[in-house]
Image (cartoon, rainbow, N blue to C red):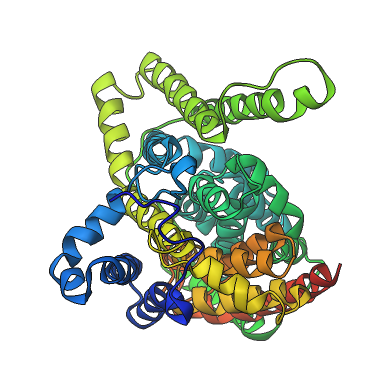
Amino acid sequence: MIYHKEEEIMEHFGIWSLLPSVVALTLAIVSKRVVPSLLAGILIGSMMVDARLNGIFHSILFSIVNLFGTIAGHPANSDEGIYGMGLVKEAGRAELVIIVFLLGAFIGVLNKSGGAYAFGEWLASKVKSKEGAQVSTALMGSSLFTSAYFSSLATGTVFRPIYDKMRVSRAKLAFFLDSTASPINVIVPISGWVAFMGALMVDNIKSVEDPIAGLVQTIPYNFYNIVILIMVFLFASGKIKDFGPMKKSELQAQKMQETYREELAAAGETQEPVEPTEKVKNGTASDMVLPLGISVLVLVILGLWSYTLPMFTSVPALPFGGNMMLIISFSIGIIIAFFKYTSKKLMSAKEFSNELFEGSKSVILGAVIIILAVTLGDVMRAAAPEGTGAAIYIGEVAGDVIPSAIIPVAVFIISAFVSFSMGTSFGTWAIMMPIAVSLMTATGGDPIVAAAAVLSGGAFGDHTSPISDTSLMSSIGAGSDHMEHINTQLPYALIAAGIAAILFLVAGFM
């Protein structure tokens, strides 16, 4: 359906403009299921638009058609005043889906090569003390930013026997895994989550035309993720001593390990190292470092060429944006991995292609969430009758009422609550980003700070909620009781969140 600018200008549905987002948010918190919740929000929005144009009966009769028609979408056309919507809004949407599948494929072959485990074993061989083991865990967890799952499982598998040997609790290991896997993915603008975060930045902030450049701008304001990472290394190095439930778990681990060793000695046995939870190849450290390192290097070179060199030299910027840079870097990484693995007989060409396929299959759900999330944002932002005009409504009612100074801290707290309730950062970002940015823009504040507050709040729940998949993976990777992991980690995360809230308040007034 084509909408013309002259039909209705800057119109919205009043407070009902917020209904799609409210429905999606409420259902997500209650059901803990992101995809159905996003679908429901899009369905409500598409029915509202159709009801205004053709009546309520027509909107009900064509509700399913309109739902999937909205997801498929229509192109943007500035001459006609059309915002655009869904998958075909612009070429960047197709690039986004390609990035997600390429990343899944790349992670799949890296994981199966055994390179990450070999890298961890090499790192573990250098460990001589408890603090050394903990700092090494934090370093490895932070370095595997291609995937939070990959980071937790690979790092946990390597360090479990080392922690048992040094009488460090599995809960402590789970804390290090969880508090590096999620935060580092939010901070590093070339992480496994960059496609989704970048798409939200471009879609919601007018001044952001390139996803990587937009994410780089949020880094100084990503207070929660910065604070929790600093705390991880302070705890790991022993600069801050354990307290609360974590201290109790550490004391119990020491007593249990002493008893266990006595029992093994009496039986004439020795403690066996824990085997990897996944069947992987006998790769070496270079099997992970080389493909991943070259991929990152290519991305850095392309970024410097496009963003930095044109500022200081006459070198022209590259004729493509951040999405294409990611596609190129991931593709080169996959090509390097193919030649390396096949040349050393680690995988046959057929095995390699199978692992690429399996890896891409693993991210299908993530791709679906991304598509639905950007579509819901489209419905909320576009002026009626193309969308509900929620962004316009927020601007009208909040512009002169809510001071922009308190918005960052309020957005962070709300996003943290929502993500903890839902157990997901992606769902929280999808729902909160359009609202937070619209509110900040309407009150004259910096939308970059609001975006950073949403990213920080979403990350809080992603690694503290008992129903978060990332937290579950950290418990599995560490071999820890899941609720013990949640209970021991939460006090540390709440302290980091409190510090971040103060910093967001200060940033708002600045």
Residue 127 % position (x, y): 68, 48
Vertical placement of residue 249 versus 319, above or below: below
Compare residues 335 and 285 and report the one nearer the observer.
335
- Residue that sits furthest to the right in the current view: 510
Identified at 31% across, 70% down, the residue is: 52
- Residue that sits furthest to the left in the current view: 61
Identified at 52% across, 53% down, the residue is: 200
Q: Is residue 116 visible?
A: yes
Compare residues 138 and 71 and report the one nearer the observer.
71
Compare residues 440 and 102 and report the one nearer the observer.
440
Vertical placement of residue 494 versus 350, above or below: below
Q: Is residue 244 left or right of residue 478?
A: right
Residue 212 % position (x, y): 61, 41
Quarter occupied by residue 159? bottom right
Identified at 55% across, 43% down, the residue is: 120
Q: Is residue 237 left or right of residue 417?
A: right
Residue 152 % position (x, y): 49, 55
Residue 130 % position (x, y): 69, 60
Which of the image's four quarters has the C terminus?
Answer: bottom right
Identified at 16% across, 75% down, the residue is: 57
Number of marks in picture:
0
Q: Is residue 170 visible?
A: no
Q: Is residue 136 left or right of residue 38?
A: right
Q: Is residue 297 left or right of residue 174?
A: right
